[in-house]
Image (tube, helix red, strand yellow):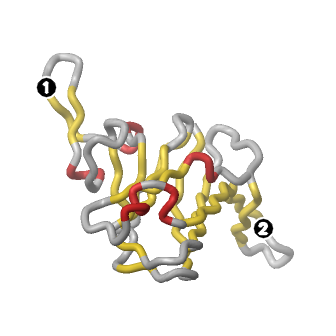
Amino acid sequence: MAISRRWALVALLGAASPASGNTQAGIAIDTHMFVERVTTDVNGRARRILMEADRAERGDSLVFVVNWRHAGAQPVSGIALTNIVPGRVLIEPADEAMLVSVDGGVRWGRLDQLWMPTQLGGTRRAMAEDVTHVRWTMPGRIAPGQSGRMSYRGTAR
C-alpha cells in the first residue's frame, strides 16, 4: 500500500534553495508498507518473505520502504524526510541515521536521548510506544535525478 501522503519534506539549516522548505524542492517520495512473514521451505529452512500490506494485523512485523528521487532541476541540500508514525505501529528505531520525536515533531533525537513528562510532574525515559515521528537528514547536496532508499521496521499494535 503506498502511503506517501504520510510523508512531508522538511527544510533544515542550510537549505540550498528557497523551495527546499516544502514539497516544491522536487523530492518525489514513494513509500510502501510490507508485512514480513516467516515460512518454511521444502528443505525445512526458515524463509522470510515480504508481502505488500493492505492491512496489518496486531503483532505483524512490518517493513516500511521509502524510495526517494530528486525530480527537481536544481541541487538541494539541508533537507530531511519526516514520517508521521501511525498510532497503531510500534517502530524499531535501530538505524543510527534515523531520529525520532515523541512530541509530535517538536524535538528530535535518538530514542535513548528523549524524555517524557509523567502524570505526577516528573519525567521518564521515552519508549518506542511514545514515538510519533521518524526523520532522516538527507546527506549533503542532492543532485537532480539522484535517488535513494531508506527503510525501517515496526510491529502492528
Image point 22% across, 40% down: which residue?
125
**Residue visible at 57% across and 46% down in the picture:** 6
**Which of the numbered marks, if any, corresponds to residue 40?**
2
What amino acid type is highlighted by mark number 1?
Gly
Residue depicted at x 62% and y 53%: 4
Residue 151 position within the rendered picture, expressed as x and y whole percent measured from the top left: 53, 65
Q: Amino acid at mark 2?
A: Thr
Task: List x then y, in percent, for residue 137.
Answer: 36, 66
Q: Earlier in the sequence, mark 1 or mark 2?
A: 2
Instruction: Specify whether 31 is left or right of 13.
Output: right
Residue at the farthest right position = 42
For disc 2, the neighbor class at 10 Å (few under 14, some 14 to 19, many from 20) is: few
Residue sitting nearer the eye, 151 or 138: 138
The number of numbered discs placed on residues in the rendered structure image is 2
Q: Is residue 50 visible?
A: yes
Q: How far from the left and from the top, in percent, is residue 103?
A: 32, 36
Instruction: Check disc 1 and report the residue beneath it.
Output: 122
Along the line of sight, the residue nearer the viewer: 62 or 8: 8
The answer to whether residue 96 of the structure is visible from this angle is no
* CA distance separating discs 1 and 2: 48 Å
Q: Is residue 112 left or right of residue 64?
A: left
